[in-house]
């Protein structure tokens, strides 16, 4: 079956750096995405990695290693507004962009 | 430009009743997805529409669930004979077609919170 593992909760302080890991076991792999979801809100897209390496977008970076079935989301210069749930999601079938999501990591940023 | 809209925002229904949930995707987005999210959980894929192709229904949990997309735009998710385990937030998303990186960015609507009593 398909499974994505990520920590359930992470706590960090304002201004710090935090890394949220995601390991996956899926029947196919065509890309890893990250989404942010504030309480009561809709998920919003953060990043997409189809190839190995690091993608940087402002304070957020995402990394993928296909040989290790592993990726991470790196958040720098944490702000209070970054408190949210973060989901990794895998595109596991060619020609289909629907995603298989992990259970999410709840990030709490403390002052 | 408007984002993805969904209606109703909240729906309370009695067990055994049918419900219809509506999604208006972003104009020009050819791909449309339905997911559901139970409290504190990740999103569970339900169904995917891409252009005029036959929909991918592989995530529908039972034959009580169905969806259609009319004119390549608005979509309706129908749940027949609702059960208490159907209670969840139902999220719709849309994305561009094609194979560019932007096509993999899904834009989500605010969701419909369904409560089956």
Image: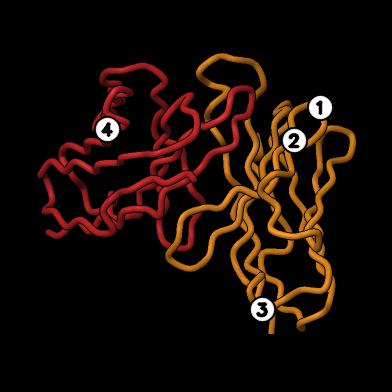
Say above or below: A33 vs A21.
Answer: above
The residue at 62%/57% (across/down) is B111
At mark 2, the secondary structure is strand
In front: label 3 or label 4: 3
Instruction: Mark 3 and mark 1 in contact? Answer it, CB < 8 Å.
Output: no
Question: What is the C-alpha distance between the residues marked 3 and 1?
Answer: 32 Å
Residue underneath mark 1? B53
What is the chain letter for disc 4?
A: A
Chain A: its colour in the image is: red
The residue at 15%/60% (across/down) is A110
Residue underneath mark 4? A60
Q: Nearer the viewer, residue B97 or B81?
A: B81
Decide: few, some or many residues near mark 4? Use Cα within 10 Å; few <14, some 14-19, many ≥20.
Answer: some
At mark 1, the secondary structure is loop
Residue underneath mark 2? B49
Residue underneath mark 3? B84
In front: label 1 or label 4: 1
Rendered location of residue A109, percent (x, y): 19, 56
Tell me if B43 is positioned left or right of B8 in this view: left
The residue at 18%/44% (across/down) is A78
What is the chain letter for disc 3?
A: B
Chain B: its colour in the image is: orange
């Amino acid at each position: 079956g398909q499974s994505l593992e990520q920590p359930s909760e992470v706590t960090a302080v304002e201004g710090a750096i935090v890394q949220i890991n995601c390991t996956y076991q899926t029947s196919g792999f065509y890309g890893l995405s990250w989404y942010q979801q504030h309480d009561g809100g809709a998920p919003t897209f953060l990043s997409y990695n189809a190839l190995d390496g690091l993608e940087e977008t402002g304070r957020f970076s995402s990394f993928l290693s296909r040989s290790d079935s592993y990726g991470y989301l790196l958040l720098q210069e944490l702000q209070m507004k970054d408190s949210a749930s973060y989901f990794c999601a895998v595109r596991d079938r060619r020609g289909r962009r629907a995603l298989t999501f992990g259970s999410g990591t709840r990030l709490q940023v403390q002052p | 430009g408007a984002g993805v809209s969904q209606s109703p925002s909240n729906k309370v229904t009695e067990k055994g009743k049918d419900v219809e949930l509506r999604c208006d995707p972003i104009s020009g987005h050819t791909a449309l997805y339905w997911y559901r999210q139970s409290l504190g959980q990740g999103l569970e894929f339900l169904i995917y529409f891409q252009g005029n192709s036959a929909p991918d229904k592989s995530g529908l949990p039972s034959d009580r669930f169905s969806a259609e997309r009319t004119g390549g735009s608005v979509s309706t998710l129908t749940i027949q004979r609702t059960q208490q385990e159907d209670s969840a937030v139902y999220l719709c998303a849309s994305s561009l077609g094609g194979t560019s990186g932007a096509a993999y960015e899904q834009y989500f609507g605010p969701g419909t919170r369904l409560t089956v009593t």
